[in-house]
Image: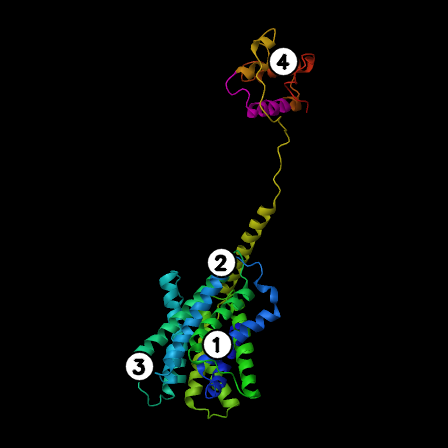
Amino acid sequence: MLLVFVSAAWGSAFPLMKDLIHRLPVEDLLAERYLLAALTLFLIRPGCLRGLSRDTWINGGLLGLMFGAGQVGQAMALGSLPSAVSGFAVGCSVVITPILSLMIFKEPVRRRVWAGVACALAGMAVFTLVRGVEEHRISLLALGVTLAAAALYSGHTLLLGRLSERPTGFPAYALTVIQLFTIGVLTGCFAVRDGISLPVGLPDWGILLHLSVISCALGFLARSHAQAHLPAVPSQILMSSQPLWVAAIAVIWFHEQLGWGMVLGGLLMAGAMLLALPSRAQARGTERRRLLSVARRAAQVLASQRIKREDPLHLQAGVTPYIAKSACTDSSACPWQTRSLKGGAEPSLERLIERATRIVRANDPQGPGCCQSVTLLGRCLCDLMEESDQTHTTGLHRWFRSS
């Protein structure tokens, strides 16, 4: 429904722009339209650009650069092409999108979606070329530039779809503001060559506000949210239904005659929209993948907030003193003998003996089976425990800590 709203909002812009460009240069209209749209969203949420990651700024700028370059190229080529041919060439993005998706991301396109692409292309042909092309020489260079603009629009759709699938989150509002500002600056650099003209009169300002707030600000924001739930190719098919809304607005508000071309084109566009909608199984699969992505993200956040448990054994810091063999009367039975062995002063050895001691005490083994547990020196662990409990007069720390 959001993409249908986007298509209707963008479709309503064509009759209004067609009326306004007679009094305002098209490049000036584009720059003012996108800058005003970005400013509107920014004023609604002034803090939307705070604390954004570097990737968000880069991706937003790249999205705006792709769409803005397409807008500039389309505007430059419009003077050398009939409007019907220009509209059809831009509409070819519905065919370019699945081809780019297959070539770049190796994503297979279902037959149902290909059928929707064919219906959308046929509908655009009926709405544009079949309805008549005025006598105008077609420039191959201008046609190539317009097709390149259509390819940029397709790349914009694919990139937006990829960003919405990231498990790290998708700041749709901030991304929309960044790309609208980028498009406005890019089109403004193209328009400033011969000065900037502003609308004259309240009706023209009303048209500009509709183009900026409804078509651009709300349209781009709805598109960003919608593409998080629908793949790029079906999204492009749904958005290609703009000629259907243009024809409906022209008949309802501008009282144009309803011909067979409009009826046939409308039926083809409606069929393309129905074919673009995902099936129930595909919708469940998409929702399942989305839930798994959210679950992975939640697991990462919880893992980063987890408090690591500390080792309950607090070993003494500093250099461990070396005990000579002469410290004990019987050096072979001295429990500190391990200090003179290589690696015997390592804390890991004390921790190992401490844990072994706790296990033996917990099991409380008695009788001949007790001495089946021996230390690294080959002595009975129970004997060492008994000696350590009885020896407190040496002034040294106990070998076994009390549990």
Residue 325's tag is none
Q: Secondary structure at mark 2?
A: helix
**N-term-proximal mark, 1 vs 2:** 1
Disc 1 versus disc 4: nearer the observer: 1
Q: Which is more foreground, mark 1 or mark 2?
A: 1
The reply to whether residue 291 is in sight is yes
Percent across and percent down for residue 233 are: 43, 68
Q: Earlier in the sequence, mark 3 or mark 1?
A: 1
Give the left or right position of residue 97, taking residue 29 as reference.
Answer: left
Q: Residue at x 42, y 85 (%)?
A: 264
Rounded to the nearest angstrom, the CA distance separating label 3 from label 2 is 39 Å
Q: Label 3, on which residue? A: 139
What residue type is disc 4 on? Asp
Disc on the earlier residue, 1 or 4: 1
The answer to whether mark 1 and mark 4 are in CB contact below 8 A is no
Q: Which residues are magenta?
A: 341-359
**For the residue marked with disc 2, what is the amino acid?**
Asp
Q: Magenta span has 349?
A: yes
- Separation (CA) of disc 1 from disc 2: 25 Å
Name the residue nearer the viewer: 334 or 230: 334
Q: Tell me the mark number nearer the camera, choosing from 3 and 4.
A: 3
Disc 2 target residue: 55
Residue 106 in percent (x, y) is at 38, 60
Q: Quadrant of the C terminus?
A: top right
Q: Earlier in the sequence, mark 3 or mark 2?
A: 2
Q: Which mark is residue 383?
A: 4
Which image quadrant for residue 225? bottom right
344, 68: nearer the viewer? 68
Mark 4 surroundings: few (<14), some (14-19) or many (≥20) residues within 10 A: few
The quarter holding residue 399 reads top right
Q: Can you identify the residue that label 1 sits on? A: 31
Q: Between 312 and 340, which is closer to the camera in this rendering?
A: 340
